[in-house]
Each structure stands twice: as structure tokens, then as C-alpha cells.
Image (cartoon, grey):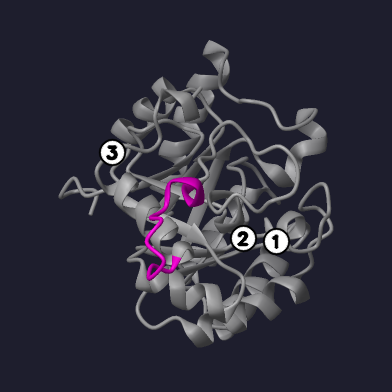
Amino acid sequence: MKQQGEKIAVITSYDASFTTRVEEAGADVILVGDSLGGVIHGQPTTLSVTMDDMLYHMRHVAHARENTLLIGDMPYHSYENKKSALSNAKRFMDAGADMVKLEGAGNGTGSISESIEHIINNDIPVCGHLGLLPQSVEELGGYKVQGREQNAAKQMIADAKHLEAIGVDMIVLECIPSDLGKKISNAISIPTIGIGAGVDCDGQVLVLYDLLGITPGKLPKFVKNFLTTASNNPDDNLIVTAINDYVSAVKNNSFPTSKQSY
């Protein structure tokens, strides 16, 4: 899709009912995200989400989906070393995932990079994640835009190239300046999936509950509530319409706008 210039629409899902609706709307990828810690568990961060939590939801989503690519978020503390990373990645695949996602790109012995490479070398596809890393929110000092400084931006571009070189198939870019999202997308041949990273990424992802406007509290800047603009036709299923509108907006480059970008 990247080679053909077609945008990739990614949506999170955590259960069978929403997964069916997401597929009906034509999403390209479903992410069972550790974002469930916030939207389902009501926690302030993703740090309390466990492997058992993730696998529970993965099994239900995998049972309902038919053709959509399915990615599972490896939760906090599930890939601290090569052995645990591979073991937990295998558990995701056994639960029905097609790919696993890990945050970060640090190098060196015992690093995230080493864990990622070990998973890939054992024939499990990996999606990377750069920019704002929710599992590192305490180290980052909160949910803040990353890559604003020149050195940080250069490092992120280098990290993206490194992830591509070790065999990562896709990279999520979260909460970074839109011009940096464009630079990274142009610098690598694998797809970039933006969430608050500008319209020039190869695709976009949103948390399902966010795009429906039902997440408690203030929504992040990069979110658009698609339910508020869904059809008023009483015969329409507004949830399906809203999800379909999101997919269409990603495909035709009308989302995100500058209003949802940094």
C-alpha cells in the first residue's frame, strides 16, 4: 500500500462486537492496544496492563475478525529481555495475532532492539513504535510531544532506519511534529502509522473509543470525534458510519488536518 501511495487505516479494537463493525467499515489493520488500560480499565496509564489482559482481548478480537491484519501490543514489562520477549510474542501469535508491537529502539545488550531482533529472527513480524512511548510516560515526564529539538529529531530518524534495518515491518509514530513524521516516512521504505504525527505518514491509527467520542475526560489534540459528524439518517448505524468516515478520511488525506497535528 505504501508503494502504491494508498493510505493505511488502522483502528484499535478490544472485543468481538466492535471488531465486526471495524471490519465492515473497511479498516486495513486492527490493533489490540494496551490503550485498553485507559478506555476499558479506567487507569491513567497503560503501565498496569498485563499479558493476561492483552491475551484475553486478543482472543476475542481474533475470533471475530476474518481478513483484517491483527496486531497485538506487547504490554509493559513483557519484553525486558530476549527470552521473555520471544516467549510473550509467541503467546500473542497463539492467541491469533499476525504481528506484535513493541515500543522503542534502544541499542545494546539486553536492549529493546535486541529483543525486537530476536523476535523477528524467530519468524514473528514486528511493528515498532517511536515518538511518545506510553509505557515510558514516567521517564518522559508525562504525555508530551517528542522530537521537537533538532538532536531528538535526528535520533528518531536514525532509530526508524535502525528498526527497518533489523527487519521491523511497520512503525507507529506518536505525538511528533508533522514535519518530522514526513521526514521519517520519506526516509524508510516500510509503512509509518501516525497518531498525532501529521498527514504525511503512510497511515493513521486512532483508539476506537476516542474516534467515537466516548472516552472519559479531555481527548488528545490529535483525536477527531467522528460520531458527531456521522449521518442523521435514522436507518444508519451511526457507529459503523463514524468508523467508515474515519477510514474514508484517512484514505482521502482529509484526516488529520492541521488542527489535529503538531
Q: Which residue in the protein does label 1 denote?
A: 36
> Residue at horizontal 50%, vertical 40%?
224
Q: Give the amino acid at mark 2.
A: Gly
Look at the image and give the residue range highlighted in magenta.
Answer: 226-237
> Residue at horizontal 60%, vertical 76%?
15
| Label 2: which secondary element | loop
Q: How many marks?
A: 3
| Label 1: which secondary element | helix
Name the spot of residue 5 as percent of width and height, x first.
Answer: 18, 45
Q: Which residue in the protein does label 3 denote?
A: 253
Q: Give the amino acid at mark 3.
A: Asn
- Label 3 neighbour load within 10 Å: few <14, some 14-19, many 20+: some
Q: Is residue 121 above or below residue 7?
A: below
Name the spot of residue 61 as percent of width and height, x first.
Answer: 55, 78
> Residue at horizontal 79%, vertical 48%?
45
Q: Are marks 1 and 3 in contact (CB under 8 Å)?
A: no
- Residue nearest the observer in this picture, 253 or 96: 253
* Residue 231 is one of the magenta-drawn residues: yes
What whole-number distance in Å separates the C-alpha atoms at marks 2 and 1?
6 Å
* Residue 123 is one of the magenta-drawn residues: no
What whole-number distance in Å separates the C-alpha atoms at marks 1 and 3?
27 Å
| Label 3: which secondary element | loop
- Residue nearest the observer in this picture, 184 or 44: 44
Disc nearer the start of the sequence (1/3): 1
What whole-number distance in Å separates the C-alpha atoms at marks 3 and 2?
24 Å
Q: Give the amino acid at mark 1.
A: Leu
Name the spot of residue 63 as percent of width and height, x first.
Answer: 52, 87
Q: Is residue 69 left or right of residue 209?
A: left
Q: Is residue 169 visible?
A: no
